[in-house]
Image (cartoon, rainbow, N blue to C red):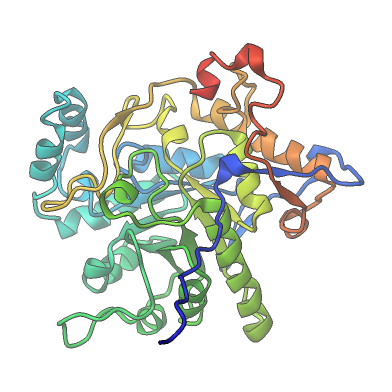
Amino acid sequence: MPAFRPRELRRSYGFDEVAIVPGDATINPDQTNIDLKIAGLTFSTPIVAASMDAVVDPDFAALFSKLGGLAVLNLEGVQARYENPAEVINEIIQAPEDKVTTLLQKIYTQPIKKNLIGDRVRAVKDRGGVCAASVTPANTKGFAPIIAEAGADILVVQSTVTSARHFSKSLKGLIFSELIESLPIPVVVGNCVTYTAALELMRTGISGIFVGVGPGATCTTRQVLGIGVPQITATMDCAAARDDYFDESGRYVAVITDGGMRYGSDMCKAFAAGADGVMLGAILAQAEEAPGNGYQWGMASPHPALPRGKRIRVGTRASLETILFGPSTVADGSQNLVGALRTAMGVCGAANMAQMHQVEMVIAPAIRTEGKSWQLQDTYFQ
């Protein structure tokens, strides 16, 4: 009889299981360079606002752009389905908890209006913002030309899991290399969590890749499907693909960790794991300027057959500028995110992101609770 060989599981790590090790030398935080580069565009704030209806509308996108970041407008959400999306968002917010999923499914069955796609992109541009517009792979070929013609700066093709090789009944599905060649703007794709998938996507010519399956505050994909990889491991694996692809091609593809970050510490760990940027949802939904008025729900929440997200209340805590740059009014790390990043880089002696990618991390599952017995009843640890 053949010898039995049990399958082996690889250990993976999330934000709460690791810590950043300070460097042997330090640098002034204000001397750090934290720029995020996507193709020919440079963002002084390496934070991307998540493509969720409760987080980004044209006003928020323009403001976020002026603060140095990049906001992604969901063009398969209420912005492109309704002339007055604010009324619809208010209806979602006021729905009882036991009826909100059904309501979301009803609201998102309204057809997408092609004229609104162009209108929303132009609204961001008219307000002086850089516009990134998000669509799913199924609608990309139909909507991408409209988005580009309206003046968008970046096309985001995003779904729960995206790969360079997709098999379906259609005669010819979405081929990223052909899409990229047909558009005058860079294409960023997500989401993935593995080295191989990331490398294959990069080889199609994309300019950036989102990393993360299921870690977001509103997402229930891991609960419903059991799929996902903790964000530290996922980011490290996809960053390794980026580095290997750069060695083979000389072209650098931005890696953006998407989801699962609650505090500045999580964000800093994402950069230490190899991220060039981070995509945030729940933290930014807490901004006074966010259209969700203290609520948030994900792109997969209204799925007609298998919803993988829920509406959550995050509250309204501060202005967007305070959340990004402070001064912080709380001590839990949810405000002045840029200050936290620069300070972490400073104590690690990392003058730029390339150096931040090289700092040491250790497995440290008790990093947030060690010596904090007086704080354990505080909401910080709940």
- Residue 69 at what x, y percent from top left? 54, 46
Tell which of 30 and 258 is nearer to you: 258
Identify the residue at the far front of this view.
1
Q: Is residue 41 something that shows in the picture?
A: no
Tell which of 122 and 75 is nearer to you: 75
Identify the residue at the far right of this view.
25
Split into 4 quadrants, where in the image is the N terminus?
Answer: bottom left
Q: Is residue 227 something that shows in the picture?
A: yes
Number of marks drawn:
0
- Residue 149 at what x, y percent from top left? 32, 67
Report the residue at 14% width, 55% height from top.
Answer: 112
Report the residue at 66% width, 81% height from top.
Answer: 250
Q: Left or right: where does residue 97 sit relative to residue 57? A: left
Tell which of 91 and 370 is nearer to you: 370
Report the residue at 38% width, 47% height from top.
Answer: 124
Report the residue at 54% width, 23% height from top.
Answer: 381
Tell which of 275 and 74 is nearer to you: 275
- Residue 281 at what x, y percent from top left? 42, 40
Image quadrant assignment for residue 239:
bottom right
- Residue 160 at what x, y percent from top left? 33, 58
* Above or below, 286 relative to 259: above
